Image (spheres, grey):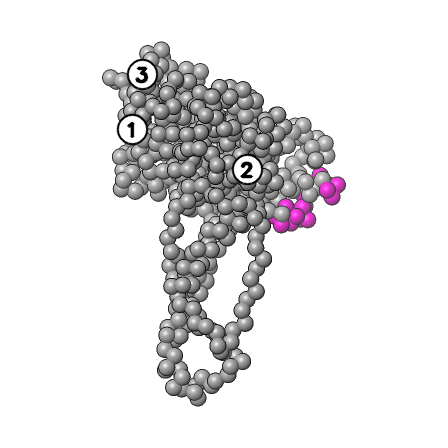
Amino acid sequence: MYLDHFGLYEAPFRITPDTDFFFGGGNRGATLDALIYAITHDEGIVKVSGEVGSGKTMLCRVLMDRLPQTVTIIYLANPSLSREDILFAIAHELRLEIAPDARAAVVLRSLQDHLIKSYGEGRQVVVLIDEAHAMPTETLEEIRLLSNLESNRNKLLQLVLFGQPELNEVLARPNMRQLKERVTHNFSLEPLVRDDIASYLDFRLRAAGYKGPSPFDTKAIKTIAKISQGLTRRVNILADKCLLAAFSSGRHHIGKSELRAAVRDCDFSTATMSSGGSGTATKTRQWATIALAALLGAAVMAWFFDQRPTVLSEQPAVVPPAPSQSIAPQQPIAPPQPTAPMAISSQPIASEPPPTPAATPTAEAPQISPTSASSSQAQKAAPDAQDRASEELGQLTKLSLAAGIRWLEEADNSSWFLQLLASDGTQPDAVEAFLRRAKTVGLDLTKVRVYRAYIKDQTRLGVIYGDYETRSAASSDLKKLPNAIKGARPFPRQVKQLRE
């Protein structure tokens, strides 16, 4: 919309990774060079961690472009793979002929034979695993076993794990000690500082064809740095909205009004980063902790006095009876009840129910037991969160999710489908953008479905395609997909694996 206004030939701040817009500042270029060296000269597992939106996927895509031609690259973007799935996925990427009902040991042996052959031909195989922090424990254990594949002198498979800082916590668990010991290189993508953000904005604008003076002055950059907390995805979103606001007002400079409009239009998560956050974020965290402690203290005191009704009733002079001002007993704060993990959401999409009017407290208000109250809240927590998540979904995503729910209710466990995309549930816009792109390139959307899965208390969104009786039929149809869709590295999966 604003391209002609600023003399651009393409959008400079898209959140979809485009390797032509890779920014080497902020230690990104040095990290890329170190990754290439580690992969081509070392034999241990490599780990790359960074906050949501710090540029991990972009770095991964550029790494795939820059690795030598002698390296065979396998990219796995779906963290919900089971330990059997990951073996089949790697075998599929290597174009190995594996029977659909083959056992894991057979697949592993076929992989080893192929890797030995590749090694003999002077080729190296590397597996890039995105969103590794969300992988099931048994799948991570399978990754450790894969790292054991070796010839007499060399490892046959190089593994690179990309994940959020939670990946470090996962590897710190006692049962993950053996996998952690195999990690020989650790890289961390830190948030960009203000000077880096200034260079980043200018670099992206120039890469998109901009030739004038920077529309972002020092004050604008300072505000963007503060609001974005140095995360490149947030920087992109804010910068894009600033340019749009400037276009709407007919200006070529980002002023206070454009900044206010951009910030107001963004709804970034209030969750602070685990590392590298700004001083403001740290203070916010501290005040939030103090406020929460005060709230808990007040609730506990209210509950304590509520448990002594006879003492209060024996002192009418201190607490005079006043029905019109009586207060219903306060409920103690109970720890949340653990809920059973859900594999796939089977609830239809519905609009958020109208809010229940608050009951007016009276002297005859029935006493609610703490146990029943906390249980009721626990039962409502998941649907409420799901309703809120559904509200954030785009129109195509909602329609495809409804289709996915209907299909999963009827599909046979032995049926196959193509996994086109797996995305973090906090990024529904990525799924919507993928579906729009699929529609543009001519993919039959009547065969496209979306599912919602819950893994380790994290919501995942997946895009799947087709319904096949056999794995070979799914693989055959995969070859017919548009090239734009093949770029996401789709692969066949079985319904029973999705339901597990």
Nearest to N terminus: mark 1 or mark 2: 1
Q: Is residue 177 visible?
A: yes
Query: Is 255 included in the stretch rendered in magenta?
Result: yes
The structure residue drawn at horizontal position 72% and vertical position 32%, both measured from the top left corner, is 4
Give the labeled residue for mark 3. Answer: 113
Mark 3: secondary structure? helix
* Quadrant in the picture for residue 200: top right
Mark 2: secondary structure? helix
Q: Is residue 293 left or right of residue 427?
A: left
**Image disc number at residue 145:** 1
Mark 1: secondary structure? helix
- Assess whether mark 2 and mark 3 are in contact (beta carbons under 8 angstroms): no
Report, in whole angstroms, how far the alpha carbon at label 3 lies from the one at label 2.
Answer: 41 Å
The structure residue drawn at horizontal position 40% and vertical position 26%, both measured from the top left corner, is 89
Give the labeled residue for mark 2. Answer: 403
Between 152 and 446, the one lying in front of the other is: 446
Nearest to N terminus: mark 3 or mark 2: 3
Q: Which residues are magenta?
A: 248-264
